[in-house]
Each structure stands twice: as structure tokens, then as C-alpha cells.
Amino acid sequence: MEQAGDHERIIRQPRMSSWRPVSADSAYRELLRLHRERALIESCAALLEWDAETYLPPGGVELRADQQAMLARLEHERATDPRIEDLLAEAEGAPQGEVAAANLRELRREHDRARATPASLVEALARETTLAQGAWEAARERGDAAGYLPLLDRVVSLTRSHADCLRGGGSRYDACLDQWEPGLTAGALDAMLIPLRARLAELADRAAGGPDLFDRPVPVEVQRVLVTAVLEELGFDLHGGRLDEAAHPSTVRMGPGDVRLTTRFIADRPLRGLFSSLHELGHGLYDQNLPAAHFGTPVGEIGSLGLHESQARLIENLVGRRRAFWHWFLPRLAAAAPAYDGLGLDDAMRAVHRVQRSALRNGSDEITYDLHIAIRVDLERALLADDLAVADLPAAWDDAYARDLVRPQAVRDGFLQDSHWAAGMFGYFPTYTLGNLIAAQLFRAAPDIDDDLARGSIAPLAAWLREQVHRHGGLLPSAAIVRRATGAPLSIDAQLSHLETRYLVPYSRP
Amino acid sequence: MEQAGDHERIIRQPRMSSWRPVSADSAYRELLRLHRERALIESCAALLEWDAETYLPPGGVELRADQQAMLARLEHERATDPRIEDLLAEAEGAPQGEVAAANLRELRREHDRARATPASLVEALARETTLAQGAWEAARERGDAAGYLPLLDRVVSLTRSHADCLRGGGSRYDACLDQWEPGLTAGALDAMLIPLRARLAELADRAAGGPDLFDRPVPVEVQRVLVTAVLEELGFDLHGGRLDEAAHPSTVRMGPGDVRLTTRFIADRPLRGLFSSLHELGHGLYDQNLPAAHFGTPVGEIGSLGLHESQARLIENLVGRRRAFWHWFLPRLAAAAPAYDGLGLDDAMRAVHRVQRSALRNGSDEITYDLHIAIRVDLERALLADDLAVADLPAAWDDAYARDLVRPQAVRDGFLQDSHWAAGMFGYFPTYTLGNLIAAQLFRAAPDIDDDLARGSIAPLAAWLREQVHRHGGLLPSAAIVRRATGAPLSIDAQLSHLETRYLVPYSRP
């Protein structure tokens, strides 16, 4: 821990009953103590969220909403503790080392955001998003959105209010983007998304096709055993983590020693469970490698969701669709599921790289994936800007899909396919596209892994990612991490080059 | 909600910055609001505890201890809120209805207990019991107590300190008993336990024997499906609950709509999973029938663990070992597990009523069960009174078992068999014996169920229990509930009479 100067001075604590002397160093330490308590509250909320996605009985949803609202309020009380302003001023005024500077930068950012948001809004968001997610799951099961739309409407209204609290001179959407990817603006996003979208649409036409050879069912129990073994062999630590099943796959980090992946196995679509699990493995490796000694402080957390997503995309697509991986995996699949005995590697590769405009984001191919995202970005921008009402969302979704991909045949395959908006995660989808771009740029700079991968190991790649990305936690901004690791600022070039090599020159593809 | 009088007066809030007028009614409502917040914190802690028993990865135990310590501190801060004393004084001073009187009585009791306990002790107990439970589980798996004893020693030390805070003029053990069974003292316990113990030892000799016909393995997956169906048919609501597996079976109520049972299936001992699940079903029915409208207030909670245990014992033993139950269940068992095809009802009944002095409490018969408890009561009294050191506990345990039951052959079958002390639950074991006594007395007064039970229904019994016991929540003391339901104060007579009828007259046994 750095020494931030040991000069003492008297600071004012206007809403406290007494004055007391603090030094910059003790102010910094007190800030970290307060933040660690917030982190513990958040880690309880994370467990409650994981439980809601996996094991919560349906009758417990309302109680869960009350629990989450209470934890959100307790966390917000600490984020807006009147002492923080003075402690920050005191700590910021002294010279700082690299760790303290990064921590203080993020503490300032969080404090300013928290102070701008009324506690009642924080509580209402926690409650309504828990209820909306329960309603989303029920609506998706029934294939009927009617009961869910009013709850989503409340979440959208609250999100608009929240963005109004935070946006300052910018747009509501800028405020939402900044929440997940600090510093990202709609303008910067457009600068990448507009040319990317045009090139992807063109690529999707040129690369369309490929056989569907993975339509033979594999029992869910078989997939579960096979995929769990794959994750463990690729380095996921089950002593400090779990793999469970949920309607919407995700990775939840409670803290050091407790990182939980969820996935979804569908008997008829065995590739879905595999790729979704590899995706969460990428998240999980990042979470398991965060610096445990800094747990509870900003430096111990991830700083950018785009960077986090890049790790998932890298394992899912760059590794998981690679020939060397399938050289290793295909015999295991055939051993576990006799229906795949006899499937050749070349055929498997053509099927793994099948390109198809589809109504569903999950399970879509590498090329059309970001076209799915672009539609969501358009719609959520319109929702936030009051240019689209929630009641009109289902039709707007279907029309956008009909224009850019393919019209959904059922509401379950339309806007009900994602739970993000129910969870209040507006401005989150762009981090998926950022993740794809960063993944390709990182993978191009990473050591060659084919010899290891063909034996079922990603150890050298994992070590490189740990060194270049994971271990930094929140110490460096994601742009700095990408530039240091790859020697260049982030652009769309590596991803487009990767897709062109893989999909337009199929017989030479790695 | 009763009106508690609407006269206003000024009360002093010495540790607050201002005075404000409150009425007895608004004081009462504020007390309930504060208590509901505590209940929500406790319900989060309950989920964390359930998760620790079911799905927590081993690497997450230390983080879990920190989370539980923080929640315990937040809960204790609220229990000792300086406003409560004045609010209580104000509310207690006015005329009250039945609900308010019961709530205020319990709020007063909890507040006095909480104020007597330093926050640091509450936090330390939460942390050390979480760590000790993790160490207990590891020690039990390894069959080696060495790493666990120092952690148990810390829990015992902290429990002694805690009891010293609470005992006033009584003994430490009285203070522990009162925590689980309000008003119970070691003297009152002895008055029942001493004669009961003598009669049980005699009965155990006279009834000893019976064939072990349930030693043919049933795969765990088969048991899981079979037992889940039984619980559901007997009335457990899976919309508002779950059944999972854990090393130590238990029932955890998060609140309305979320009651979770855990059980343990052992392939070689299929009766164990059945009876442990029926036991938890008894707890679960009580928890699911508590008055939801009073959730978060004392009236909405159970007031006595002995009464709670009675519900579990009643379903496990009085119902689950009854001939009519087996008339219904045995064909189902045989259909699910062909190894039991051909086992006759009379033989099954003799095996279900097998009596044997054993080293293990779990799975022990109805007669020797309370002899297991009596040993634990002796040992925990000695531990608390400083008459026994934790280091000497393993040997003292084995010697007591050698004297009263049978000497354990392995430490796993000795004092490592129970997690209660690791969890800091001293004075809890007597509620098991109370539960047996209350169960027998209630069952004797309940409507006859054999016709229904032979068809797999306990509906009339469940309705009677809901009416006589469950719906009252914490409104009435357990002694009053027992007296109202059975027409007599609690005694050991009904249990002894039940055991004599069932075990000494086997050919007439119901």
C-alpha cells in the first residue's frame, strides 16, 4: 500500500457531530474500508441474483425483489455517505502511487454518480428489475409478452429518470454507455458501428451457408458431464467456482474463491451449450484471475465490460471455433455421444462456421452476431430518447429484424429472447461488439496456441491473457490495456481481417 | 392491525439530534418497520447459509464468512438502534390488542438480548461459525478432526462470552436454552429429561432388535425422484419451495414463497433419505403455513424451536413409520427400486421399527433417539460450564457413547457427526427432545388419519396442524399452543405411551 503523505490537517465533516483530524493516508484507507463494505453488500446481492437465475422457486420472486431493494439501498447509503466527499478531497490532495490514483479516480466517479441518484430511484430500480426479470422468464416460457410489457415499461421509465440524473450535458444513452464502459459515447460507438455494420452485412451475404451437422440430439446429462470436463481441462478452477444451468447464461463473481458460471443445455442443439459454456469460461478465467488482494477496491474489480466481454468472445470464437480445438474436442464428443461418431473434422469445421441470418442472437454466427447487436442499439437508443414506446417495441423489433436479418416467427424468438432490458441493462449490448473487436485484436497479438490447443490446453494463451489483461483488474483503463497488449489503439480491422480469413478462404482456415 | 391509542406525547430520544412527537401507535408502527428491515437482512443471511450448505464452492468459504459477519453486524446495528428503547417504552405504555402485545413482548426480549451483546461479539460469532462449519465439513470428509478442533474451540469461547452477556443470574446453559426455546431452563429440562432417559434406556433393552431389510442400494437419482414426489403428494408446495441435497439436512425459510428443504440420500441406506426428507417436510409445512401477512414481525415467525421440531418429528415418526403410510409407500418404492419388489408389509414394518443402540443419531430409532440427545446435553453443558475442554471433547463423547449406547468406531461417527456446535447452536439439541414429546401429544389429539394416509394423503392432519399450530406463528407461546390443542400441559406421557404401544405390542401396532 502506498504512502500518500502523512501530514495531518483538520477537515470539516459538516453532517457529523464532531470534527476530527485525518491525514491523506488515513482518509484513503477509510475510503477503501467503506468501499470494501459496499463490495461485500454487492457480493451478497450477486449471490441473490445468481440464485434468482438458478434455483429460486417462482413463489419467492417478490421476497427477492424486497431483499434486492434493501441491499441496493444499503449499498447506496454507503456510496453517498456524507464523509466521502471530504475524505476524497483530502486523499486527492496528496501525491499518490499508481494503485491509489486508480482507486481514487474510480471512487470519485462512483461517488459522483451515486450522489446524482436519489436513493428512492436506486431502490425502485432494484425492485422493479427483479420483478421484471421474473415476469420475463414467465413470459418467455409462455410465449406471451402481455404480462411482461407493463413491468418492462416501468423499468424503461426508471432508466430514463436514472439517465437524466447522470447525463449532465450528454444524452441519456451516453449516460447508460458510461455505466458499463467508462468514457464510451454514442458518437464514438457510431464511428465503429456504422462502418462495421456495412462490412458485416456484405460479409454475411458472401459467406452465407454451411451444413447444419449438429442437429442430432445429445442428452442434457451427457452435455453437462462433457462440457464440465472441457471447462476444467481448459483451466476453470472448480475449487473456486461452479457451473450451473439457467435460462440466461452468465458469469457471477461473488469475490475471490467464488466465481459461478451458468449455461444452458438444449438436447437438440448441442453446439449451443458448448459455445455458451466456452463464452462464460472466458469471463470466468478473467474473474478468477483478478487480483484477490485488492478485492473490494476498484483496482480489484474489472474496469470495463467491453474488455470483460472480449475474454468471453476470445475463448468462444477465436479458440472454440478453431480447427485445433475441434481436432481435440471432436473425438471426445463422439465418445460421449455416439450420434457424432463418424463425423469428420472437415465437415465439423464447415458446420461450426455455418453463416446464417437468423432471428436469434444466441447461437448466431460470428459474422451476423454484431448485426443483432446493432438492432438492439438502435432500439434501446430510441426507447431512452422517448422515440419508441415499450408498447411498440415488439413490432419495432420484428420490423428491424425483417429488414436486417430475418423476421421472427414467434414473440419468444423476438424481443423476448434477451433479459438485459428486464434487468435494466440499457447501454450494455454495445460491450458485446466492443468485446468482439478487442478479442480479435488481442488474439492476433497473442502467442500461437495451435500445438497446445490440439492437445486440449490453452495454458500459454491463458498465461498471456492473465499477464496482459486479467491481473491489472481496474488499475488501467481498457484502452490502455488494449494498446499495451497489441501495440495499437482499438479498431475494427483485426475483427474484419479475422472474419475474412476464416469465412472467405474456407479451405485455408485455421 | 390494532389501534394502540392515538394520544400524542413528546418522548426523549437522547442519542438523536432532535425531539419529535410520536404516538404509541406510530411508535409501534416504526418498531415493526425497523424489525421488517432486520428480517430482510436475516432472510439474505438465510439464503447465504443455505447456499453454504448446498452449492458454495470450497474456495468461497472465507468470503462467505466475511459476508455473514457483515450481515450480522448490520442486523445487530438495527437490533440495538438507540431509538428502539424509547419507541418500546412509548408503545408498551398504551393499551394493545393481541397481535401488538405479542409483537411487543418479543421485540422487548430481542432488544434486551441484543443490547447485552457487543457488536464485535456478534460479528465474531458470525465469522467464526461460518469458518468452523467449513472446517467441520472438511474434517468429516477426511475423517480427521485435527484441523477442526481449534476452530470449534473459538466458537465455544465466543459462545461462553455470549452466554455471559445474556445470563443475568442464571447459568450459561440457561441463557443458551432461552435463545431457542424462550423460558426453558436447565432445571425444567432435567425434570423431563431425567425420568425420560431412564424409561427410554429400559425400553431400548426390551424392544431391541428387528431385521435390517433396507440394506439393498437404491441409486441416489431414483431416491431423489421418488422422495420429491412423496413430499409433493403430502403437501409440500414446490412453487414456494425446493428440495436440495446437503451434508446436513435442514429447512431454511427465506420468507413467504421461499422455503427450502435439504436432505441427504445415501444409496446403501434408502430409509435415511426418506425419513430425513419427511422430517424436513414437517418443518417445511410449518414454514409454508406461517402467516405471510405478518412476515418480518415476531407474530409472523415461529416462536419456539421445540414446537417447530415437533412438526418434523410428527411427520417423520408418527406418520412416516405408520402402517397406513407404508401400505401406500411400499408399492411405490418397489416400483422405483426393483430390489424391494416382493418385500411384504409386515416385514417392512418390522424393519422400520428396528431398535438398535448405535453410534449415530441420524438414522437412529424413535426409542434411542433421545438417549443420543441426552449425551449431547451433558457434553454441551460441561463445555459451557468450563468443565470440559474442546480438546477433550472427542474422548468424552466416545466414553459417553460407550456407557449409554455404543462406542463409535471412527471419529466421523463420533462427535464429528453433527454440525450444530460448529454453527454455535448450543442449547439447541434439547429442542429435539421437546419436539418428540410435543409431537406425540399433538398426534394423540389430532384427527385419525389412517384412511387418508393409506391413499397417500395427510390432508386432514395437515389442516388440523395448520389450524392448531402453524397459523399462530409467534402469536402464542408454545406451551399455550400445546395446551389449547391437546387440553393438557406438556408431559412425557404421550411419547412414552406411543413408544410402548408401538414397540412392546408389535403385532397390534398401527
Image: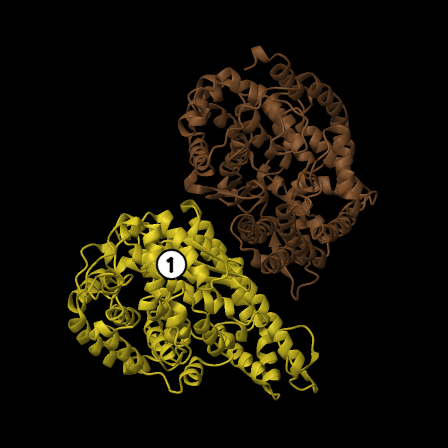
Chain colours: A yellow, B brown
**In this rendering, would B91 be left or right of A236?**
right
**In this rendering, would A262 be left or right of B101?**
left
Q: Using the rendered view, name the quadrant where residue A197 is placed.
A: bottom left
Residue under label 1: A249
Q: Position of residue B227 (x, y in %)?
A: 46, 33
Q: Mark yes or no: residue B475 visible.
A: yes
Q: Looking at the figure, which quarter contains the N terminus of chain A?
A: bottom right
Q: Position of residue A435 (x, y in %)?
A: 36, 73
* Amino acid type for the residue under numbered disc 1: Pro
- Nearer the observer, A140 or B36: A140
Q: Looking at the figure, which quarter contains the C terminus of chain A?
A: bottom left
- Nearer the observer, B122 or A112: B122
Residue at the image point whose x is 63% and y is 28% from the top: B436
Q: Position of residue A254 (x, y in %)?
A: 51, 62
Residue at the image point whose x is 28% and y is 58% from the top: A417
Q: Mark yes or no: residue A419 visible.
A: no
Q: Position of residue A47 (x, y in %)?
A: 50, 57
